[in-house]
Image (spheres, helix red, strand yellow):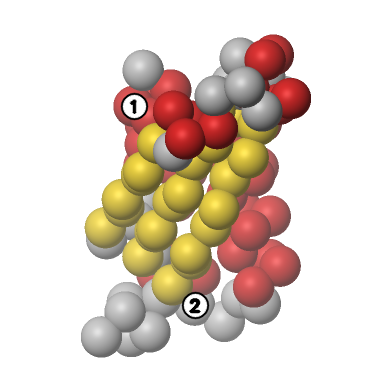
Amino acid sequence: MTSELIKQKLNEAIQPKTIEIIDNSAAHAGHAGAQSGGGHYNVTIVADAFDGKTLVQRHQLIYQALGDLMKNEIHALGINALTPTENN
């Protein structure tokens, strides 16, 4: 469910060419962060919105798009943010 929310929010805010979300939450069962219900996710996102942006700026765009999900639903988020030319 959270994977779909992540995808929806990123699609709306960043309009990526491609997006892949991997839910690694099961591998972290018993982890302190998992006890509060927050999941562990890896996101690979390719978007024109990242063109000319530093790595930090790209991550900031993603965190901003996810908003409140970062407070409870997401405990850990691995990000691979690329422009279309970097994805070739």
**Mark count:** 2
Percent position of residue 15, x then y: 36, 51
In terms of secondary structure, where does tag 2 sit? loop
Q: Is residue 88 above or below residue 40?
A: below
Q: Which disc, if any, is residue 51?
A: 2
Task: Name the quadrant of the C terminus.
Answer: bottom left
Q: Is residue 73 left or right of residue 36?
A: left
Question: Few, some or many C-alpha atoms within 10 Å of disc 2 (few <14, some 14-19, many ≥20)?
Answer: some
In the rendered view, tell whether residue 65 sits above or below residue 50.
above
Task: Name the spot of residue 84 as percent of width and height, x first.
Answer: 32, 77
Q: Which residue is mark 1?
A: 4
Amino acid type, label 2: Asp
Residue at 31 percent across and 50 percent down: it is 20
**Quadrant in the rendering for residue 46:** bottom left
Direction top: furthest residue: 36
Q: Amino acid at mark 1?
A: Glu
Q: Residue at x 41, y 75 (%)?
A: 83
Q: Mark 2 or 1, which is nearer the eye? A: 1
Residue 23 position by quadrant = top left
Q: Earlier in the sequence, mark 2 or mark 1?
A: 1
Image: 44 above or below 11: below
**Quadrant the N terminus occupies:** top left
Question: Which residue sits at x=36%, y=44%?
Answer: 21
Residue 10 visible in the snapshot? yes
* Image spot of residue 16 (x, y percent): 34, 56
- Please report the residue visible at 63 percent of the width from the left and 40 percent of the height from the top: 76
Identify the image quadrant of residue 69: top right
Q: Is residue 32 left or right of residue 6?
A: right
State the SS at label 1: helix
